[in-house]
Amino acid sequence: MPYRTLLLAAFLSITLFLPLSLAGCGSSDICLGCDPSSTPTPNPENSVDVIGDIFSAIPATLYTDLRVLVCTDRPSTTPPLDCGGRNTEPLDNGDFSISKVTPGSLEVFFYLRTDAEQLATLEDPDEKLTNITRGETVDLQSITVNLNTGSAQASYIQIGPTATPTPTPDP
């Protein structure tokens, strides 16, 4: 008799409680630790990451005085600063990273924090940024930003899959 009771309890816990405990995990979010009070991390497959480094700026300026702006599918009549895109401030060494960018045709702009009128547009002669899809990372390396001419050039533009973070258990 105790054997049947144990089997019944195991069956009920697997069929009833396991699905309920996992209901908050998965789907379009990654649940790190499945703590219901925490905000799930958006799935990297639903957006685009843009990373890069600024090699030099003309006129000479601190990298932290610059802003990097990424616009997606911007109509030509919309000014870049009104595109509703994502922006960031580079680190002291010029490195920057922007996550949760909407997939599509991307444009990258650089401007001074104190003077948004001085704007440089990243040149994309091979049109690598015209059809960025979900789950990709755009890597822009060794960028020269020339605010005097309004242009910026990257030594290379590389598109690849975004790495999916591996959840780590809480200690």
Image: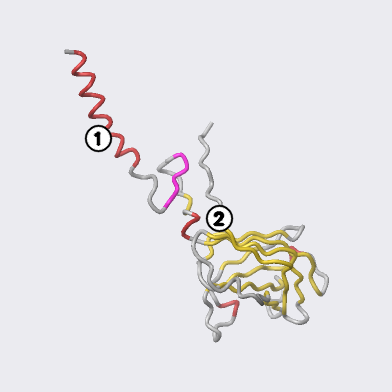
- x, y percent for residue 131: 53, 71
Task: In the displayed orientation, state which residue is furthest to the bottom.
Answer: 77
Badge 2 amino acid: Thr
| Magenta stretch: includes residue 79 | no
What crowding class fits label 1: few (fewer than 14 Cα within 10 Å), some (14-19), or many (20 or more)?
Answer: few
**What's the mark number on residue 16?**
1
The residue beneath circle 2 is 162
Q: Give the range drawn in magenta.
A: 29-33
Picture mark count: 2
- x, y percent for residue 121: 67, 77
Observer-side mark, 1 or 2, equals: 2
Badge 1 amino acid: Leu
Q: Tag 2 or tag 1, which sits nearer the N-term?
A: 1
Task: In the displayed orientation, state which residue is furthest to the right.
Answer: 60
- x, y percent for residue 6: 23, 19
Quadrant location, the C terminus: top right
